[in-house]
Image (tube, helix red, strand yellow):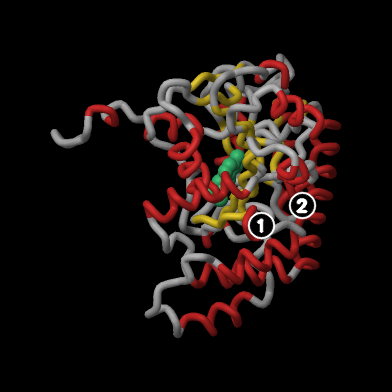
Amino acid sequence: MSRFLVKGLQNLESYTPGHQPQNHDFIKLNTNENPYPPCPSVEKKVSEKVNSLHLYCDNSTKELTKTFAKYKNISEKNILFANGSDEILAFSFLAFCEKETGVCFPEISYGFYEVFSGLFQVPFEKIPLNDDLSIDPTTYFQKGKTIIIANPNAPTGLCLTLDEIETILQNNLDHVVIIDEAYVDFGGNSAEILTKTYDNLLITGTFSKSRNLAGARLGYALGHEDLISDLNKIKYSFNPYNVNTLTQTLGVASIQEEEYFNNCTEKIVNTREYFKKSLEKVGFTVLNSKANFLFLRHQNHSGEKMMQYLLEHHILVRHFLNPKINDFLRISIGTEEDMEKVLKTMKEMVK
Ligand SMILES: *Cc1c(COP(=O)(O)O)cnc(C)c1O
């Protein structure tokens, strides 16, 4: 730390990303990436755009927004794209989180919520989960502050129903409720439909997980046009060119190649269910995940030891130090072939 860092940030705990080895000696199941490459047409489409990189990108992301609006059957005014959904979340902290009242989120959830609270100096409250790690919607009633909930939640993969989300919205009509749908395409129910009724609902989503584009950085917000307009105000005060030309092209291609998207998500969901059943047969407890990862433990083996064992066998998974979940591993769903290898290793591990 230099002598010059502002006081408010001297104790900031920044986000620790999962390990990103740049060699390919590992089966990499630690950051919930999609194991399949981007849709087939992207190489051609991107190479056609490379020649225009001397120009700034379209700051209104016109074509991308139009294509997504048509796909979702909503108005362009209800959509904003950004440089990953992390950036949407950052904009939302600036736009919707008052320093007097603050923000709340589940005690176990996506680590960035707490990091952003620190960065933007917004007080936060962590709301306890039920003993089975699910979320009790009633614990979010009348909070008097901004709410952020990942649905499916991470790293549990557990979902709230739309009815439960609706009760949270009804009980917080004067505050924004952000539902982070990073994993919704793997079997959750999107709250999209509720944006038509509730002007306090903001949905965030990403092309990083279900659309095979983590490296391109593309995320979006869906919500009432006034919320989107507020987010635009932040965007145009921060970085109007936040989604680069190549990424906009990739996004359009991904939406247009719907069949490829559907095939990839279906494969991942099928692999997840097969992997879950197989692990349960050999004594693992596996939560009912609707995401592209499983959250699991084994009564005879600590999370730390299992993580270490898998690492020695060139399999990268995520382990968390929080004592409430330190016996769990979060394992992203890879290709069928990779998951067979992982299954074999895990069976040997508990034998
Ligand atoms: C991966 C993830 C994000 C971030 O996605 P990007 O679009 O890659 O920034 C947001 N929320 C949750 C819960 C995630 O797991």
Q: As rendered, which of 57 and 5 lies closer to the eye?
A: 57
Indicate the position of residue 168 as horizontal and vertical percent values: 71, 25
Q: As rendered, which of 62 and 108 lies closer to the eye?
A: 62
Tell me the residue that label 1 is attached to: 35
Q: As rendered, which of 257 and 162 lies closer to the eye?
A: 162
Using residue 207 as the reference point, say whether residue 284 is left or right of it.
right
Residue under the image location 45 percent in, 50 percent down: 233
Indicate the position of residue 287 as horizontal and vertical percent values: 76, 29
Residue under the image location 37 percent in, 34 percent down: 119
Q: Earlier in the sequence, mark 1 or mark 2?
A: 1
Indicate the position of residue 275 as horizontal and vertical percent values: 80, 42
Residue under the image location 73 percent in, 65 percent down: 70
Disc 1 is placed on an element classified as loop
* Type of amino acid at the residue the image marks with label 1: Pro
Using residue 194 as the reference point, say whether residue 227 is left or right of it.
left
Residue under the image location 41 percent in, 25 percent down: 99
Tell me the residue that label 2 is attached to: 268
Indicate the position of residue 176 as horizontal and vertical percent values: 59, 33
| Mark 1–mark 2 CB contact (< 8 Å) | yes
